[in-house]
């Protein structure tokens, strides 16, 4: 995230504090940041494990584990609420310069595509955020396209230079590991995690097939 991470890691952390009753109190910027994250996460429900992990890591890096845990609880509540996106974007825009806003958009695109695809609904909400932040749309498409493709290769544990034969081999190996028939003995929570992973794999594989032009 570059500059925006530095901004978040500095002034925003200073605005966070815990009351005696151990409830997190968010500063104006950090609250709006969480609301912006929630607006992207809630487009596709239920939220995938990949998105949860990505956001938890982001919060932990920037706020520390204790505050991050509390911030994530607040984020989960935001996922149930209607988010005033116009107002949130206006407040974010006032706090970040153009460069940091663009870096923030890169983060949000990464969040949207971390589970292997970018749905039309996710694209729609990201386009709204772009317009509200007054970011030039002409600089976004390449970032979106490349992020989605690279995320797909990461999900399969390979890179873009991997041969088609090895791509198919990696996919078959992971499908066997995460196939619903192979995880039926696990508890419900673990089955949900494995099911999310299996869905990510199939979607990522479809993206890679289109990128490499094979069937």
Image (cartoon, helix red, strand yellow):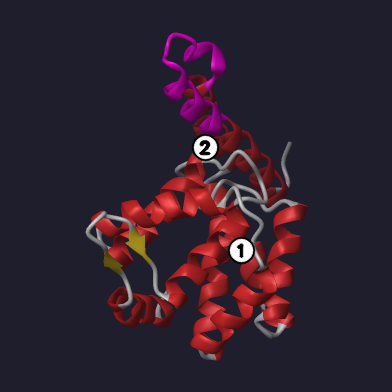
- SS assignment for the magenta stretch, majority: helix
Check if residue 15 falls in the magenta segment: no
Q: What secondary structure is marked by label 2?
A: helix
Q: Is residue 203 above or below residue 11?
A: above
Q: Is residue 89 above or below residue 121?
A: below
Residue position for label 1: 146
Dividing the picture into quadrants, the one containing residue 145 is bottom right
Residue extending farthest to the front is: 21
Residue extending farthest to the left is: 20
Residue sitting nearer the eye, 89 or 19: 19
Residue position for label 2: 166
Mark 1, other Cα within 10 Å: few <14 / some 14–19 / many ≥20: few
User: What x and y, as percent, mark residue 5?
Assistant: 38, 75
Quadrant containing the N terminus in the rendered view: bottom left
Residue sitting nearer the eye, 103 or 40: 40
Q: Is residue 97 above or below residue 152?
A: below
The residue stretch that appears in magenta: 179-198
Question: Which residue sits at x=47%, y=15%?
Answer: 183
Horizontally, residue 9 falls left or right of residue 101, namely left
Residue extending farthest to the top is: 185
């Amino acid at each position: 995230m570059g500059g925006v991470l530095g901004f978040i890691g500095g002034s925003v952390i200073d605005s966070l504090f815990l009351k005696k009753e151990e409830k997190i109190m968010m500063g104006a910027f950090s609250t709006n940041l969480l609301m912006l994250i929630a607006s992207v996460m809630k487009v596709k429900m239920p939220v995938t494990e990949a998105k949860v992990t990505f956001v938890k890591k982001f919060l932990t890096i920037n706020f520390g584990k204790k505050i991050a845990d509390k911030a994530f609880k607040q984020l989960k509540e935001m996922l149930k609420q209607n988010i005033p996106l116009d107002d949130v974007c206006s407040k974010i825009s006032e706090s970040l310069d153009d460069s940091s806003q663009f870096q923030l958009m890169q983060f949000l695109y990464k969040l949207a595509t971390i589970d292997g695809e970018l749905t039309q609904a996710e694209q729609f909400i990201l386009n709204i955020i772009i317009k509200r932040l007054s970011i030039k749309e002409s600089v976004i498409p390449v970032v979106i396209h490349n992020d989605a493709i690279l995320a797909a290769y990461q999900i399969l544990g390979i890179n873009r230079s991997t041969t088609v034969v090895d791509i198919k081999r990696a996919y078959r190996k992971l499908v066997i590991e995460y196939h619903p028939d192979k995880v039926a003995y696990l508890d419900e929570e673990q089955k949900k995690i494995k099911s999310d992973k299996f869905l990510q794999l199939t979607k990522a594989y479809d993206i890679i097939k289109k990128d490499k032009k094979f069937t």
